[in-house]
Structures are given as C-alpha cells and as structure tokens.
Image (spheres, rainbow, N blue to C red):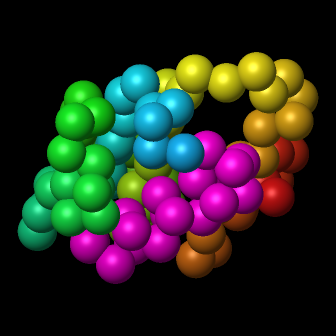
Amino acid sequence: MADAVTELLSEILVRNEVSLDELVSIFFTATPDLHSAFPAAAARGIGLADVPLMCAQELDIAGAMEKVIRVMLHVQTDTPRSEIKHVYLRGAEALRKDIAQ
C-alpha cells in the first residue's frame, strides 16, 4: 500500500508541478480487497503532515478492477482544468482511457 500510494502521489505532484504548499486536501479510495493499511498513512509518511486527508472504500461492484487506489487532490492552482495531467499507473489506465496520460 505504502509503495503504491507514494508512487501515485509523487507522479501526480511531479507531472502537474504541484508543490506541497498548494495542497488543500486529499481524498483516497481503495477497492474492498485492499485492507492492509490506510492510504492516508502512506501520504503522512512522505511529509503531508498538515494536509487534511480522508480515506473511503470504493463500491464493491462485481467484475470491477481489483487492487485500485484512487486519489483526488484539491489544489490551489492557476492551471486550467484542461491542462491537468491525470495519472493512472500499474494497469489502471484501463479505467479511464479517455483521460489517462
């Protein structure tokens, strides 16, 4: 869990040139098969001590992709929405081929 969350958050921040000071809050979800740790705990481990974090479980839908962590960052930015880079890793690109970069 920690490695996947660290990789995902790092990629999102780097690709979008977001600094830690621009983060307002982060919302995580994980599929029901992921229950070993909280994604937010991994985020705390990379220095997000003062950013509000929340975790939730994805709906348990038959046939849905397993072992998926999703993250939504709320960021103070002047970057237009059309220029935001959506990050999908480790096969999750199949979830949103229309916006995966």
- Determine if residue 20 is in view: yes
Examine the structure image and report whether residue 80 is included in the region drawn in magenta: no
Q: Nearer the viewer, residue 42 or 23?
A: 23
Q: Is residue 56 left or right of residue 101?
A: left
Q: Nearer the viewer, residue 67 or 19?
A: 19
> Residue visible at 39% across and 68% down?
6
Residue at the left extreme, as displayed: 36
> Residue visible at 65% across and 60% down?
14
Q: Is residue 18 left or right of residue 94?
A: left
From this view, report whether residue 71 is shown above or below residue 11. Answer: above
Secondary structure mostly seen in magenta is helix
Q: Which residues are magenta?
A: 1-18
From this view, report whether residue 81 is shown above or below residue 97. Answer: above
Percent x, y for residue 62? 40, 50
From this view, report whether residue 12 is shown above or below residue 28. Answer: below
Quadrant of the image for the C terminus?
A: bottom right
> Residue visible at 78% across and 54% down?
100
Percent x, y for residue 21? 45, 36
Q: Nearer the viewer, residue 49 or 93?
A: 49
> Residue visible at 60% across and 64% down?
11
Quadrant of the image for the N terminus?
A: bottom left
Q: Is residue 43 left or right of residue 5?
A: left
When asked about the image quadrant of residue 28, the answer is top left
Percent x, y for residue 49? 19, 45
- Determine if residue 60 is in view: no
Percent x, y for residue 74? 49, 26
Q: How many marks?
A: 0
